Image: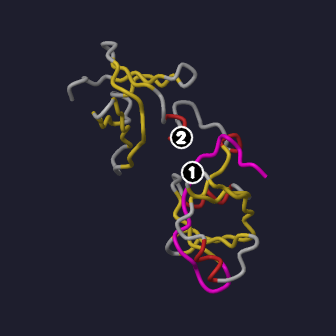
Amino acid sequence: MLPPKDLVVMGFVAAPFGVQGWVRVHALTETPDSLLDYPTWWLGRDGDWRECRVAASGVHSKGVVVKLAGVADRDAALALQGQQIAVSRSAMPEPPADEFYWADLIGLSVKNTAGEDLGRVVGLLETGANDVLQVRQGERELLIPFVAHVVLKVDKPGGEITVEWGADY
């Protein structure tokens, strides 16, 4: 089966867990166990994806652990180490108003209130205090705090974010 075109990376397989094919998962979601809301995952690297069904799961003291269908022992689990975990964006619920999935922000253009083009969002960073947009234009990268007094408007359909931020910051 071909993978969906709208895959969003939500985590990766960190390591085997035990000897019966379980794996420890590092989730890139707001809460680690929210990855368990999706019974079918796509595992892969470098665009080579395969569909996997979550057979069993649990929350362990060091995060989420899962048993994937067809993964019977530690060797099979070890072979998955480092693989990315993705789900179809269409399977994800719509976020509440004024909240956004990071995947929806990547690729949007960023302009300031003076109309200057600051570049495109290439990633986001979680700093603890607030998230930060990584905006790149050519070789130049800006780090813009994703907070209400800086990010004034996110226009997903229009593909643009308006910020109160100087081009020379």
- Residue lying furthest top in this view? 114
**Residue 9 badge:** 1
Q: Residue at x 35, y 19 (%)?
A: 117
- Residue lying furthest right in this view? 1
Looking at the figure, which quarter contains the C terminus? top left
Q: Residue at x 38, y 36 (%)?
A: 146
Helix, strand or loop at mark 2: helix
3 part of magenta stretch: yes
Can you tell which quarter of the image residue 34 is in?
A: bottom right
| 41 w.r.t. 167: above or below | below
Side (left or right) of 54 relative to 107:
right
Q: Amino acid at mark 1?
A: Val
Residue 71 versus residue 166: which sits nearer the camera?
Answer: 71
In the picture of the structure, the residue carrying the numbered disc 2 is 103
Residue 39 % position (x, y): 73, 58
Q: Amino acid at mark 2?
A: Ala
| 31 w.r.t. 163: above or below | below
Asked whether disc 1 touches disc 2, contact meaning CB atoms under 8 Å apart, the reply is yes
Can you tell which quarter of the image residue 43 is in?
A: bottom right
Q: Residue at x 41, y 29 (%)?
A: 120
Residue range in magenta is 1-21
